[in-house]
Structure formats: structure tokens, C-alpha cells
């Protein structure tokens, strides 16, 4: 027998697809094509990308993902990411 969480996880892709479709349609009808599309895109990433991930992992696990990342590591990674497209190679 599936737990409630497992049942939700099985249904989640279909539910997210349907709700995102209706969100896009509603936002485009209310705000026009460009702004409505942006609002639908934000809906998808906030609900599907952030809130569902937060629900799946929990607050403690989510915070642990960012806990060990030091300031120097973030700066070095950012500089490396920006250096590559600018043509700087070591």
C-alpha cells in the first residue's frame, strides 16, 4: 500500500502540468501575452521548482544544501563561470 506522500509523488507530474496550463491560460487572459507568459513561468518555477522541492526535502535538508558553501567558494565559482565565456583560460 502506498503512503500518502508516495501517492502524491506519483500524481505530482500530471497535477503540475494541468495546474501550470491553467495558470498560463489565466495569466495570459488577465495580463496579455508577454506579462501573462512571464507570470505563468514564475508560477511554474515557484510552485514546481521551489515549493515542491522544499516540501519534498524539508527545511532542514534544504538549508543543509547551502550550509557548507562558503563565501570564497561562491566567489571563486562565480569568477570561473564568468571567466570562461569571456575567453579567459588558465
Image (cartoon, grey):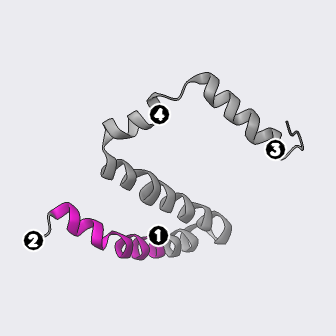
For marks 2 and 4, the one nearer the N-term is: 2
Q: Quadrant of the N terminus?
A: bottom left
Marks 3/2: CA–CA distance: 51 Å
Find numbered disc 1 in the image and state the secondary structure of the residue it sits on. Answer: helix
Q: Which numbered circle lies on residue 13? A: none
Dot 2, crowdedness within 10 Å: few (<14), some or many (≥20)? few
Q: Is residue 65 left or right of residue 56?
A: right
For marks 2 and 1, the one nearer the N-term is: 2
* Residue labelled with disc 2: 1
* Residue labelled with disc 3: 84
The quarter of the displayed image where residue 80 is located: top right
Where's residue 70, x and y in %? 55, 24
Q: Which numbered circle lies on residue 66? A: 4
Find numbered disc 3 in the image and state the secondary structure of the residue it sits on. Answer: loop
Marks 2/1: CA–CA distance: 33 Å
Give above or below for 39 relative to 60: below
Tell me the mark number nearer the camera, choosing from 1 and 4.
4
Q: Which residues are magenta?
A: 4-22
Where's residue 49, x and y in %? 46, 56
Amino acid at each position: 500500500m502506498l503512503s500518502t506522500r508516495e501517492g502524491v509523488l506519483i500524481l505530482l507530474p500530471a497535477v503540475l502540468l494541468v495546474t501550470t496550463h491553467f495558470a498560463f491560460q489565466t495569466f495570459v487572459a488577465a495580463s496579455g501575452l508577454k506579462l501573462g507568459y512571464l507570470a505563468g513561468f514564475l508560477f511554474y518555477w515557484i510552485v514546481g521548482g521551489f515549493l515542491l522541492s522544499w516540501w519534498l526535502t524539508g527545511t532542514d535538508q534544504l538549508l543543509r544544501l547551502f550550509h557548507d558553501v562558503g563565501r570564497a567558494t561562491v566567489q571563486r565559482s562565480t569568477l570561473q563561470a564568468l571567466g570562461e565565456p569571456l575567453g579567459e583560460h588558465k
